[in-house]
Image (cartoon, rainbow, N blue to C red):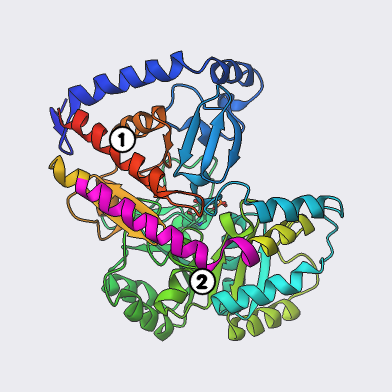
Amino acid sequence: MQAIRYGVNWAQAQALYQRERADFAARRPRSRALSQQSAEHLLFGVPLHWMDDWSTPFALYVESAKGAAIRDVDGFSYTDFCLGDTGAMFGHAPQAVADAVAAQCAKGFTTMLPSADAAWVGGELSRRFGMEKWQFALSASDANRYAIRWARAITGRDKILVFNGCYHGTVDDVFVDLEHGQPVQRASLLGQVYDLTCHTRVVEFNDLAALESALAHGDVACVLAEPAMTNIGMVLPKPGFWEEAHAIIRRHGALLLMDETHTISSGPGGYAMAEGIPADMLVLGKPVAGGVPCAVYGFSADMAAKAEAAKRAAPPGHSGIGTTLSANMLALAAMRANLEQVMTDAAYAHMFRLARILEEGLRAAIARHDLPWCVTRIGARTEFQFCPHPPQNGSEAEAILDGELEHIVHLYLLNRGLLITPFHNMMLVCPDTTEADIARFVDVFDNLLAQLKG
Ligand SMILES: Cc1ncc(COP(=O)(O)O)c(C=O)c1O
């Protein structure tokens, strides 16, 4: 066993973890009882097996979630910096969205026909994101799946390209990693019966030469990317990366499909809009309807014309794109309220200001305890990582992921009323987060580091 791990006194950290687990379990009899009850009929005792991946000895059961706060069934309150891993990036149950949903509930949920909100939402999405035409899905995973299918139909090419360590939801095509420079299918996938490496190329983020040679075959329909990687810990593009990458993608006739599902933290029009990266298609899920299940994907004018032509040229029948409840009336009403009243410039200004204070506070605490950790931020999204300098690609980012240390950190915070995302160390600030919330987070984090340092 290493005595010091990422600057942490490991024996002390493990002892701390055992104490935190015991403390959590002792003080949450209702969550424990519900976990035991759920185990009778739910796989792993939870309605989604990921809910078993948190740092707690059994699942934390939620009583209510509003704004930046969650209350559990045992009466404890938490300031939520996880925010449903971005689903609630604009706060839990924003009032305008809750009101719009309640009003729509009286008028029907789903008809497989458009409601009057559809045209307004399409226009607003175009204004914000610069894409001409839009379609809707129920999740970002679905939206990515459909966008890939459109890209293949538009280009007549069969392959896609992704960056090593990416995550774009449960989309089969993207679960290809680089191992010692070779593409391999992710070993953890369940029930995968065909070889994903046949149709997916993978290169490191920030590696323009690798991108150029992977696209030079002329068979890639689209590059599917987050403009900054967020799912293997944060990896930012090097200055000028996207400008060059975009030119390479164009040169080889591939499309650029931007997944802004997490990087919508960068501003009301997303990262690509803020940085002037001209994508061909764009996907956004999770918080776009204020946490009501919904996702959108957009096409540039040129791509929209080609997509419509591809559909018209195809034989009649199912396109393989869409689901029955996609673009339902409830989701459209929620999205309209969210875009109109919640996801505003003023909300972003508040989120950015507080996230900056959080970033500086975390950095100062890390420096005070002389730990070899760093902090990265994209707008309202902040992350601390167990390395002295931010990683520059997926391999570097993966090398410093440490699930055990993350659990210790997360549980210590949770037991003190602070939730962060259960995977890596991501924190979001929402419009309801206050300066006092940030100050408390930094204070508890500072105390934790003192204990971990020993
Ligand atoms: C960048 C990105 N795209 C897509 C998804 C998939 O979202 P969902 O699970 O809502 O389908 C995620 C989920 O974390 C994501 O981070």
Q: Is residue 42 magenta?
A: no
Amino acid type at circle 1 is Val
Residue range (magenta): 339-364
| Residue position marked by numbered label 2 in the rendering | 269
Vertical position of residue 412 compared to residue 139: above or below: above
**Residue 354, position in %: x, y?**
38, 55
Determine crowd level at label 1: few under 14, some 14-19, many 20+ residues with C-alpha closer than 10 A: some
| Residue position marked by numbered label 1 in the rendering | 444
User: Quadrant of the rendered structure where residue 448 is?
Assistant: top left
* Residue sitting at x 54%, y 70%: 282
**Residue 167, position in %: x, y?**
45, 54
Q: Quadrant of the C terminus?
A: top left
Is residue 121 left or right of 18 when viewed as pictured?
A: right
Q: Is residue 355 magenta?
A: yes
Is residue 431 left or right of 329 when viewed as pictured?
A: left
Is residue 411 left or right of 193 when viewed as pictured?
A: left
